[in-house]
Image (cartoon, rainbow, N blue to C red):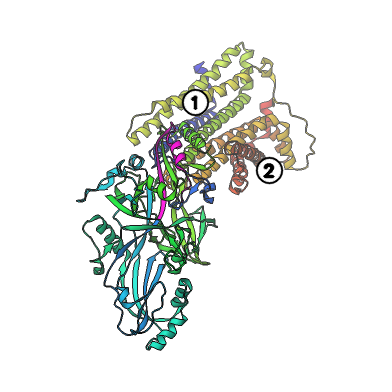
Amino acid sequence: MLRFVINHWRRQRGKFILTLIGALIISAGLSLMFNLTDSSQGTVEQTLQKKWSSAYDIVVRPKGSQLASESNDLLEPNYLNGIDGGISFKQYETIKKMKDIAIAAPVAVMGYVKLGLRVDEQWDVPDKPGFYRLRETLTSPNGFGEKILSDEAIYSVNANQNARVADIPGVFTTKSTSRIIYPRTFSLLVAIDPEAEAKLVGLDRSIIPSKENSRYFTKNDKATEKANPNTIPILLNPNSFNQGTFQYSIERLDVPFGTQKQQNTFYSKIPKDFTPAFKMLNEIPSKTIKKFTISSKDVEQKFFSTLTNTPTKNIQSSRLDNATIADYLQLEITTGPLTYRPEKSPYTTRWSNAYQVESQKIQVTNPFLKDINALPKTGYRSTHSLEKKVKDTMGSGNDIYYSPGFSMNVIGLYDSNKIRVSKDPLNELPMETYRPSSADLVLDANRKPVNPAKSINTSGDPVGLLTNSPNMLTTLDSAQQYRGNKSISSIRLKIKGGETLSEKSDQLLQQIKATIERDPGLVATITKGSSPQPAVTKVVEQGKTLGWIEQPWVHIGAAMTIFRETSVGFSSVIFAMLAVAIVYVLATSYVSMLARRKEFAVLLALGWRTKDLYKIVLIEAAILAGFVSTVALIVEGIFSYVRNEAMNGWSLLWIALFSLVIYLAGATWSAWTIRRISPYEAIKTGEYAKAARVGLKLRSTVTLVLKELIGKWKRNSLSVLSIALPTALLTFFLFVTFHLQGVLYTSWLGQFVALQVGPMHYVTMGVAITIAILTTGEIMWQNVTDRRASLAVLKALGWTNGAIRQLIVLEGFLVGLISGVIGLIIAYTTIYVLYDLVPWNEPLLIGVSLALPILFGVIAAFIPAQLAARVQPYQELKDAS
């Protein structure tokens, strides 16, 4: 039997070479596919596993704190500090006791306090009589220029001895002014659970040793409620993030004030109430006499060093040498999150998501903060002042506003750079408690690129775009005492288990999330496996566009999304390659059986048994499968040599099994055909398939081709299928490639992974195209071979060689067109089943599905067309006789 098979291939060298080429391509394709797929998938999963861990797995927030961007699975990079409580201590304890929770670390944003210094002997008011404005203006750079954070003033009167001084708050005589300045900066106070924070980020290991016995929180560090003032324990970060400047100026109001009469006249014009009085005085023009500046960074560093009795470092201003501090602080304001609105991206290829933030007028309920201009006039965050209104019992009858006050018990210093938090840009999460946020100015107001991009850092502006990290941490009971039982802003969770990137881990996370959200007042967001995604924000100040800033937003669940999409992609590649190979082998088996039908009929007539014919096709299948495995072994050896690693035995085993399955499928098809062969077919001539009757008038070459296609619809259906299936899979490849890139390039982790995915898809597509052309070519070749007699008749009737070629090429064109339509239907159906979408807005996919099969059909028809043109009528008549 083996000799018979070898002799048959020797006689049919042309078809044997074509079969061998097909087997070679299948073998190389399977080898490359398994190696590249195994390498790419291994790299992807290995990369995703490394980035699967994160600072915290789930973040719990109060209901209503979600942002509009979360519908796109995006979290703002600085969202935690903008949440003003909302979670109760009871809810926290419930979450903490859940069996799957390893760490529950709450954060309570208590609000902003002003850290202040007292600096004597600074105002040098002239002796000349006058009404002087002593102005303190705090400015800070925000990336677009200098912004005024506060513009406060008091008034000093240098008048005649007998002149009456107006009894107005904020107006003093020169002697009572005492030449004192009070530079103060806003600083955020946050409460934590010391034990949970130590487990989550290793805060206890970030303590800075000092002579003052710097230490971490203990269980005995609690807020004292009955002291006067109340005292709270403080862990202090001595590093300053402020970039602002205090500008001090002495201005003489431009009013007549030289004589006693002029002074009294001016006094009479000043309203008796504080608010209208200050409004009037602030509007009077003035002339600046003296001015000086002090950096807010110097103020903070002097405050921290004096508070902790540590040496002062790098303070530039000598005016602060003798400054003292007031360790009594007041919680003055809290701020909300930024309000983002979706915006059309200026460059969609770089930023798929764009937003807009616009400034708003700052409104607070404490009129004192408003009257003295202690806050910016506009900001990007909502503001709420913390005060208690009481009546003045000293006789004025006016309302007095008291902000909650406390005294600090600084127990230690910590360095936020020493905390145990991932700084990998591929999977870092917002940790505003320890890391200040940042941004880059990438486009100007006219959408022109800023090159190089300009870094925008945090400032001391509590209502600005980027807020500072807190310099002061206290215990959770302090938040409960000052802000109430629902003062917890968020809870960061680490879960037990789920260390491995898998569907099982995701199910565990989803289960915990669902359990938490059974409480209607809570919302849980899974942050494990998230990755930064660049997004651009349009910054608008009072209707005027300042520019566009880029920030790394948090793409929720990026790792799991990539894992699922690449798994579908890799699986589809394997299935596609196998499907194309099986279709090719089935098609070649069918064509081979058409060509050898008479041969097998003769063998049966000579006494061969059907089982003997089965053996022939099985031996052929086994030889070709062995050839595929041998080539795979060679390719695997090359891969191993290039990579300098051991050969992958599992890949070889899978390739051998798949090649055996592929060629056994072809042998099974051939065996089924052999069963239907009868010995009497040995004496038949011409074509074996009966043509179906077609009610189509013969008017042109096109109708002749259509009659041929419809008349032999079974055979031509296989030809159409042989093109349609590879085309459908090729279209699916393109969709997977572009869709996968859409998934991958939405995050920095995805961009890193994308470098490992692309080549594998394109190599497989190249192999699929080659096999599709071979399949089509062999079908067309056999069609021409079977129709040599009818083609000879056409030539005998006067058809030229060119007309014969045109007929066959047109047949290939129509087969390709029909295949394209069917392939498009198959591809879009597959896409809908796997991805639940139909990409009608992808003209490239539609164009490929129609154009490529037509191209394949035409290319595959070239050689058969040449063979058809060489048919000689007399030779066919001679062979028939």
Type of residue at label 1?
A: Ser
Residue on which the image places disc 1: 659
Nearest the eye: 200 or 308: 308
Instruction: Give how far across and how far down residue 742 sits, in percent.
Output: 51, 46
Instruction: Give how far across and how far down residue 70 sits, in percent.
Output: 52, 48
Nearest the eye: 207 or 155: 155
Nearest the eye: 625 or 243: 243
Whether residue 592 is in magenta: the answer is no
Residue on which the image places disc 2: 803
Residue 192 figure quarter: top left
Q: Is residue 337 above or below residue 672?
A: below
Q: Is residue 464 above or below residue 585?
A: below
Whether residue 90 is in magenta: the answer is yes
Q: Secondary structure at mark 2?
A: helix
At x 44%, y 46%, the residue is 488
| Magenta residues (range) | 84-111
